[in-house]
Amino acid sequence: MHIAIFGANGATGRLLTAKSLEAGYSVTALVRSPQSFPFADRVCIVQGNAFDTSAVSKTVEGADVVFSTLGAKSPFRNENLLPRAVPLIVAAMQQAGVSRIIALGSAGARQDALTKQPLWRQWVIQRIIYNTVLKWPVREQVVQHEILSSSGLDWTMVLPSMLTNGPARGNCRIDGDALPRLAHSISRRDVAQFMFQQIGSPQWVGKSVYISD
Ligand SMILES: NC(=O)c1ccc[n+]([C@@H]2O[C@H](COP(=O)([O-])OP(=O)(O)OC[C@H]3O[C@@H](n4cnc5c(N)ncnc54)[C@H](OP(=O)(O)O)[C@@H]3O)[C@@H](O)[C@H]2O)c1
């Protein structure tokens, strides 16, 4: 199995890289700063930016599965990362005949995210978090969802609540319809584990899925 990873040097990307290597898979990672990448000696590195068409194409070449855990540096400004990078990844995959992508999103990517929350919580999360504090990351994820769902690829977008660096709990709630009631946070370890499991599972192909504590 050959895995391509975008965002491999980020917090969730490192966990996915480690899991892929532990499973004996070969990995190609698009990385901006290989000198700070802890797996540099064990993966094939494409040094570059996710806005660079040729670096993106090189990364997906020959992959069986693509993971993306790309994320903007600051939630407080419009970096326009996913709206620019995800179309390049999709186009490169289509060109190379690679069909499977498993991407990290966020709960705010879908309109129905809050339908299982009490009304007071819907109001707080929508008005204060999604429309204000996390306005830019949520917009990026809405666009990523639109691009992947119309890509024709075998896509899965994983939509977590707030991410933490805590230990894996292993008993997360998974829901295809909405964020589970009173969802608060989830560890990146649990998210990486779930994303990794999707390699061999048809259940969420062509879908997005919420995950939380
Ligand atoms: N934080 C939360 O509570 C939360 C909750 C739900 C969903 N999310 C979503 O989760 C994702 C972030 O996950 P994370 O915490 O694992 O991310 P992270 O640690 O910030 O890693 C993001 C990765 O993206 C890479 N990247 C950014 N811009 C790039 C570019 N132009 N070219 C190439 N690589 C680029 C970074 O590269 P460098 O290493 O070179 O900087 C980094 O490796 C985001 O999409 C966010 O919306 C976050």
Image (tube, helix red, strand yellow):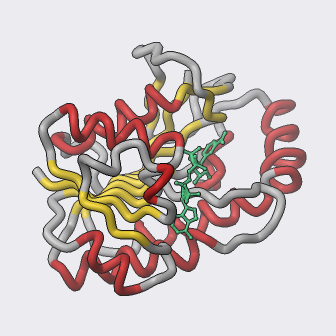
Tell me if residue 193 comes above or below residue 101 in the rendering. Answer: above
Residue 58 seen in this snapshot: yes
Q: From the viewer's side, name the closer residue of 39 and 112.
A: 39
Is residue 110 left or right of 207 when viewed as pictured? Answer: right
Give residue 125's position: percent from left, percent from top: 80, 40
- Tell me how many marks there are: 0
Give residue 149's position: percent from left, percent from top: 41, 67
Residue 101 seen in this snapshot: no
Tell me if residue 13 comes above or below residue 77 in the rendering. Answer: above
Q: From the viewer's side, name the closer residue of 61 and 111.
A: 61
Q: From the viewer's side, name the closer residue of 105 and 124.
A: 105
Is residue 198 left or right of 118 when viewed as pictured? Answer: left
**Which residue: 28% across, 34% down?**
19
User: Which image quarter is the C terminus in?
Assistant: top right
Give residue 35's position: percent from left, percent from top: 47, 55
Give residue 161's position: percent from left, percent from top: 62, 35
Tell me if residue 197 comes above or below residue 39 in the rendering. Answer: above
**Which residue: 34% across, 44% down?**
39
The picture quadrant where one finds residue 163 is top right
Q: From the viewer's side, name the closer residue of 85 and 206.
A: 85
**Which residue: 45% across, 27% down?**
189
**Which residue: 60% across, 60% down?**
141
The picture quadrant where one finds residue 93 is bottom left
Is residue 153 left or right of 56 when viewed as pictured? Answer: left
